[in-house]
Image (tube, coloured by chain):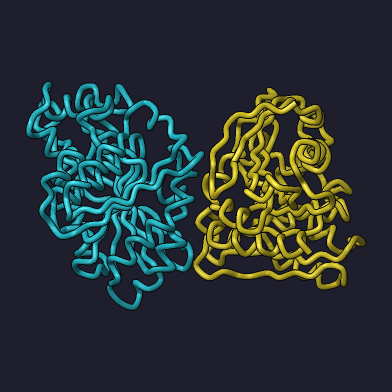
Chain colours: A yellow, B cyan
Amino acid sequence: MLTEVSKNMCFGGWQKVFSHESSELGCSMRFAVYLPPQSESGPRPALFYLSGLTCTEQNFITKAGAQQYAAKHGLIVVAPDTSPRGIGVPGEDDSYDLGTGAGFYVDATREPWAKNYRMHSYITKELMKLVLENFPVKPGAIGITGHSMGGHGALICALRNPGLYRSVSAFSPICNPSACPWGQKAFTAYFGESASADWEAHDATKLAAGYAGPELELLIDQGEADEFLGKGQLLPERLVNACSGNARLKTRLRMQKDYDHSYFFIASFIGDHIEHHAKALLA
Amino acid sequence: MLTEVSKNMCFGGWQKVFSHESSELGCSMRFAVYLPPQSESGPRPALFYLSGLTCTEQNFITKAGAQQYAAKHGLIVVAPDTSPRGIGVPGEDDSYDLGTGAGFYVDATREPWAKNYRMHSYITKELMKLVLENFPVKPGAIGITGHSMGGHGALICALRNPGLYRSVSAFSPICNPSACPWGQKAFTAYFGESASADWEAHDATKLAAGYAGPELELLIDQGEADEFLGKGQLLPERLVNACSGNARLKTRLRMQKDYDHSYFFIASFIGDHIEHHAKALLA
């Protein structure tokens, strides 16, 4: 049951926002869908975009300028929210990097988060099913990308669910959350104090070594002037190293001079990412 | 004296925001400047973009996706704020369409607004001078555009100051403010109760008839699904009629099916507008 919250014509297609009651998360959730002009005449590939810390479904659709390229290549683009909303878990609104706006695309196993903070199942199962049932998506032609926490999300969704996404890319992703302050804080809360199998199972760098699914080429853009790169939150070189030992994973890490962590950076390269996905999904 | 508030690399150029003390407005003001890659090697044309009601200098630079096209054509893009800020005029924060965020690009003549609400002189004189002195702008190669209240602003800046702007365009402009609720409310406050010479001198439809400057081609995009069109706030047909009687003014009004008043609309056509200005300014 989807409720249309808004719709705006954009580059000849419709940028829509819907709300629905999520059974995984136990709350009402919003997500955005861009329907390119080509989707009126038949099924099209779909690209999921996962946002970073503090974001809602709005940031990407208002700031990234992706609709232009989605319209050019005929891709449906789905942009979910970043956590359950208004659950009332104690402390969920205390900091920007844990709880509300910071679901980290994992299924928490530890109280008080375990019941509702199930963003991994929400993205890969519940929302996937909803999207396939309600929009003209070409079966099997699904890609995933994201930014920062959402880049981490895109990587682990692809690496944990071989074959579910045919293409993957990321902007300034948190590549090794077990080894950075953001990831350690979130994983401690969601999975428990010390590094465990749960930590490894939601860390792209750890997952890359053991990935045994279909071949994937990971396109990653990273700004060299990104303050969080300097603070050791992102660690892209560790993911590249891990992938270099796995013939099924090719990485194309592009270090972008002078670019930072903002949507000005994403806007500058989202065209390349959508082309990367279109090539794989339209092949 | 400019203070750099922020800078972000975007499409190979720099999106910057500055603050300065405005003598016209009597307060600290912010404005945004996009410097395309080409501006590093010599003077470039500049395009001013005036925003609509409630906006700051941020809306356009984060939502319109203009940097891509400015980088392509090598245009500097200047995006000012929409009113003085924090002046303390009684009532300036009471409604979204008068006072703060709603300067209407006029110099008010009526108290309590007259001292500070001088956005027309700010845009056409003070900020113009600041921009010419501080950025590599090609002399004489200046265009102006805007949205809604800012579309009105772009039109009256061009029509009241013949030769100052070599190109002009607008998105869903308030074309005949003397005859619509938004304009009547603002003009009553800023100029006085009954329609007067001041009203006529800041109304594009009135100004078009008497314009005697260099030839201008007005590119205007208007969404057909724009709620404010239906409410009689915009009245583009009146401007087209007025221009049809003046050989110096050509209008190209494009009614865009299904598009509304939002930045999704602006983003879809800003590329065409920047091309329109680039043609005139690079000629």
Locate residue A82: give its quadrant: top right
Could you say where residue B272 lies in the image, as x and y percent from the top left? Answer: 41, 57
The answer to whether residue B270 shows anywhere in this view is: yes
Q: Which residue, as the protein is rendered here, is positioned at the far bottom?
A: B41
At x 64%, y 70%, the residue is A254
Left or right for B121, reference B240? left
Up/down of B86 relative to B185, above or below: below
Could you say where residue A179 lies in the image, as x and y percent from the top left? Answer: 74, 56
Left or right for A173, reference A66? right
Could you say where residue B183 lies in the image, as x and y percent from the top left? Answer: 24, 30
Q: Nearer the viewer, residue B106 or A221?
A: B106
Q: What is the count of numbered marks?
A: 0
At x 79%, y 50%, the residue is A138
Q: Nearer the viewer, residue A199 or B256?
A: B256
Left or right for B7, reference A85? left
At x 24%, y 22%, the residue is B91
Left or right for B14, reference B107? right
Locate residue B81: give its quadrant: top left
In the picture, the quarter occupied by the C terminus of chain A is bottom right
Could you say where residue B40 lies in the image, as x and y percent from the top left? Answer: 35, 74
At x 60%, y 29%, the residue is A5
